[in-house]
Structures are given as C-alpha cells and as structure tokens.
Amino acid sequence: MKIEPFKVEEWMNAYEVGAKYNIAETCVDSISIDELFELVGEDKASFLDALCSRRLTYGDIEGAAPFREGVCRLYRSLEPQNVVPTHGAAGANHHVFYSLLEAGDEVVSIMPTYQQLYSIPESFGVRTKLLNLKEEDGYLPDLKKLGNLVTSKTKMICLNNPNNPTGSLMDLDTLRKIVEIARSADAYILCDEVYRHLTQEDGWNESIADLYEKGISVSSMSKVFSLAGLRLGWIATTDSEAIGKLLSHRDYTLISCGLLDEALAGVALRQGDRLLDRNRSIVRRNLRILDEWVQRQPHVRYVRPKAGTTALVHYDLDMESYDFCREMYHDTGAFVTPGDCFEMGRCMRIGYGSDTETLMDGLAAIDRYIAHKVEAETDKLNEQEGTL
C-alpha cells in the first residue's frame, strides 16, 4: 500500500527532541502518574497494589469497564457498548477507514486538518474530495460548497472539531446542518474530536456521536487529558452495524489495548472534570498570552482560536514555511510547525498548551528571529538603493 509521507509527524520526529522552546507540542502540559493521582484525589498505593497483583493477560478484549464507562461520561447518549478502545486517536482514525471504506468509495474531507483524514482514504483507493477552509470564513466549512461536494456516492464526510491546526470550532447549528447533508447521502460522519472540551468559553462542546445516528467520534487520552504516554484512544458511535465491523476488523489488527493503560485511563476519567478544569485553565491563560503577542507583533496575524491547543499564525516575511521554521529552530531553539505540513504556505502552527514559561520564552525567541530577518532585509534594500 502506497501512502503519502505524514508531513507533520515527520517534522515532529526530526526536531522535537532537541527543541529548546517546544511550542509545536499539541498536548496540554503532560502530567506524571504521581500528578495524576494527586489531581484526582485517589489512593495511589492501593491502586498500584491491586494493579501489580494482576496477571498480565490481554485483559478485557473489548475494553475495561471503568475506562469505557469513563468515556461515556464525555458524551450525552453513549453506553459502554458504543465505545471501541484503540491505540490512540491515530489508531482510531486508521481503524475507522480500514473497517468501513474500500477502494472505489467516495469521501469528502476538509483542508487544513490532520493529514490522516485524507491521506489514509487515498491510500485505500478511495476517491477523496477536499473542502478548503478559508481564513476569511474563520476556517469554518462553507456548507453550500460542502453540499455540492457530497453526492449519492459519498460514503463518509471527515471533519475535525475543534480544528487542528486553526483552532476553529463548529457550533451546534453548523453540526446539525452537516448532519442533514450527510443524511441526504446516507453517509457516515467521522469527526476527529481529540481537542473536544478544551474550549475558551464555558459550556458543553457537542459531539457528532450524539447528534447523528451514523456519527463517529474519535478521541484519546492524549491532548485533553495530558496522558499521551498511555497511547490510548477510542471510537464512539451509536451505529451498531459500524460497531460490529469495527470489532470484527479489530481482531486482525489490535485484539485489545493495554491492561495497564486502560487501568490508568479509568482512574483519570473517574474524576475527568478535575483534569479538564486544570487543562482549560492552562489553555485559556496561554491563549491570552498568545493573543497579546499576535496583537503587538506587526509581522504576524491569525484567526483567534475558539478551542483546542493550536493556532495557525501567518507571517509576512518572504520565506517558505519550512525554511522559516527550520532556520528559526537552529538560530533560536524555538520549535513550531511549518504551515506547509498542512498544505498552508507562509504560516506556522503554534501550540499553546505547554507550560506558560515555555510559551512565553518561545514567543520571545520568535520575536528575536523576526527582528533579525527584518533588519537583514532592510539592510539589503538599503544597499540596493545605494548602488542605484
């Protein structure tokens, strides 16, 4: 099977370890197991004693009950049988495509988004149509254009809400209209919701799994709950036929998730509101800092994110994004993601879920780099004018 290189992951793999100021990271500031138990207020010693006495079998093949019950509390209408555990959200997205699509099917996806949502279907021989999100629309989908792309042959619409990399957030009315478009074609909606609940305003963040009988929600413990090291995600849907296919294909690829991972995730989700309160506080504080920086830095602009941990920041320097980000990394240690990883030129994705000090130091490093480039460009222009 031929598949396109995964641009954002290749970039992260190449540069993340040596970064001085990592503001490319998309998870909210990660926590240790000690911090997890302190946050949720459970007895760590008792938990570890019970866990260490367990035999390391495959565990619950379809997922440990405390974990799946905890996932259900993140939705309005789900029961444990509606949840399929996976190896992260990346594994969940791949598994949905592998289980529900085949060569010759038609999919509509958005751009920019996480590359899985269009490159994996393409690799399966699926005809993939793209709906480009526009800055002037706040990176929200044009519903008329979406409706024109969807046909009777459309098997699935792929969304990302909140959006990575822009931080845009579709509201309930928009989601309901997309449901009607999908229902007209009897199409699935796959919505990557890994940043769901990390909102800038209080209130419930709707899921496609609660709104549509063929809605499929994908998420994980990584971004929202700061536990990427568990490598644990899930697929959630009320579509029993889809669940059957997902479980059948899972026997070939996964069998089960890790017993230890699901046990720790169950602890986190029992008191999930405590983790969410912590992490909302971080992203709300940090977005204020990022927003103030954008307002005072004359060479950048963005659409202010509504949710999630990422922002797509455009710059006015005459440099392609890979060159801009690579040179800045080596000159200052500031690590961001090139916009071209998302097919977006002359911009960068900044992650603002890190600890606040790292974010502030990283933004200051970007300031120094931009000032240096602007000064160099000014000197070059002055030299050229002097020779005329």
Image: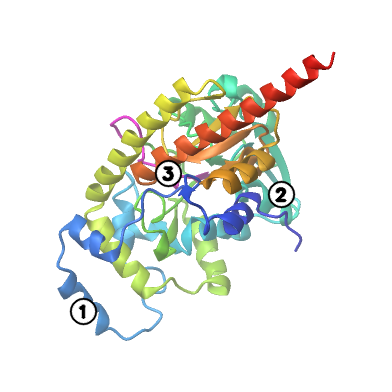
In the rendered structure, find residue 50 and report the number of the disc placed on it: 1
Residue at x 71%, y 43% (from the top left corner): 128
Q: Name the residue tied to disc 2.
A: 105
User: Which quarter of the figure is the C terminus placed in?
Assistant: top right
Whether residue 371 is situated above or below residue 328 in the rendered picture: above
Residue at x 73%, y 54% (from the top left corner): 4
Q: Considering depth in this image, is 179 or 283 the residue closer to the camera? A: 283
Residue at x 62%, y 38% (from the top left corner): 339
In the rendered structure, find residue 75 and report the number of the disc placed on it: none
Label 3 Cα neighbours within 10 Å, binned few <14 / some 14-19 / many ≥20: many
The region drawn magenta spans 191-204
In the rendered structure, find residue 195 and report the number of the disc placed on it: 3
Q: Considering depth in this image, is 321 or 179 the residue closer to the camera? A: 321
Label 1 Cα neighbours within 10 Å, binned few <14 / some 14-19 / many ≥20: few
Residue 329, percent across and down?
58, 46
Residue 355, percent across and down?
35, 46
User: Which quarter of the figure is the N terminus placed in?
Assistant: bottom right
Label 1's element?
Answer: helix
Residue type (three-letter) at the residue carrying disc 3: Tyr
Alpha carbon distance from label 1 to label 3: 32 Å
Instruction: Indicate which disc, 1 or 3, sits on the residue closer to the N terminus.
Output: 1
Alpha carbon distance from label 1 to label 2: 48 Å
Label 2 Cα neighbours within 10 Å, binned few <14 / some 14-19 / many ≥20: some
Residue at x 53%, y 62% (from the top left corner): 246
Instruction: Indicate which disc, 1 or 2, sits on the residue closer to the N terminus.
Output: 1
Alpha carbon distance from label 3 to label 2: 28 Å
Q: Considering depth in this image, is 304 or 316 the residue closer to the camera? A: 316
Dominant secondary structure, magenta: loop
Are the residues at dot 1 and dot 2 in contact (C-beta closer than 8 Å)?
Answer: no
Whether residue 66 is situated above or below residue 226 in the rendered picture: below
Residue type (three-letter) at the residue carrying disc 2: Asp
